Image (cartoon, rainbow, N blue to C red):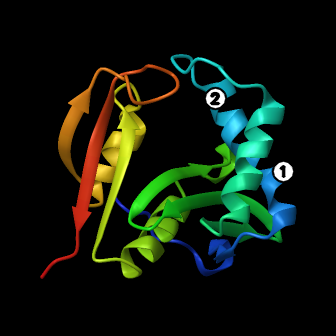
Amino acid sequence: MNFLPTRLRPAARPILGPARPTDAEAIGTILSDWIDETPWMPRIHKREEEQAFAGDLVARGWVTVARRCGRVVGFIARDGEEIVALYLAGHARGQGIGTALLDRAKRASPWLTLWAFQFNEAARGFYEAHGFRELARTGGARNDEKLPDIHYLWEAAR
């Protein structure tokens, strides 16, 4: 799989902006659909709980969404320098939208950190291709799913 940034066609370029309360349902659906599509990911929360989680992220002001034709097709949630979540709708993957969301976060901070599941090879490849380096691995004690994960750091060039 190619994890290098994809060049967006002008017509395909998403509009990025802060999430609105009305976006929480779409954000929760994107997250929940990803869980359904991912064989190694256990479903430990009901869809309704994921919707509530999305609403909480939006209410905290942590979420930037990518819109195409007025619809939310992806989002990134940040708590300061920590990326809490970055997910795209299935039909929007591989089109440079994740890169656009991540680049916006990079422009807002001199450093970023995040956790990725060790099983999530696509995410790991994406983050490593975008300059994140591994800090540590754990057995999963810190996450709800209890899956092994990796702590990553990105620092702006000095």
- Identity of the residue drawn at 39% across and 30% down: 142
Quarter residue 140 falls in: top left
Is residue 139 toward the left or the right of residue 12 in the image? Answer: left
Instruction: Say what amino acid the circle numbered 1 marks.
Output: Glu
Q: Is residue 18 above or below residue 82?
A: below
Q: Is residue 93 visible?
A: no
Q: Find residue 55 and report its horizontal and vertical position in percent.
A: 77, 53
Task: Name the quadrant of the C terminus.
Answer: bottom left
Q: Is residue 77 above or below residue 109?
A: above
Looking at the image, which is closer to me, 121 or 135? 135
- Identity of the residue drawn at 65% across and 20% down: 44
Q: Find residue 95 and report its horizontal and vertical position in percent.
A: 54, 59
Q: Find residue 123 and report its horizontal and vertical position in percent.
A: 41, 42
Q: Is residue 47 visible?
A: yes
Dot 2 or dot 1, earlier in sequence = 1
- Identity of the residue drawn at 18% across and 45% down: 135
Q: Secondary structure at mark 1?
A: helix
Task: Name the quadrant of the N terminus.
Answer: top left
The single residue placed furthest to the right in the displayed view is 22
Is residue 12 toward the left or the right of residue 142 in the image? Answer: right
Q: What residue would you read off at disc 1?
A: 25
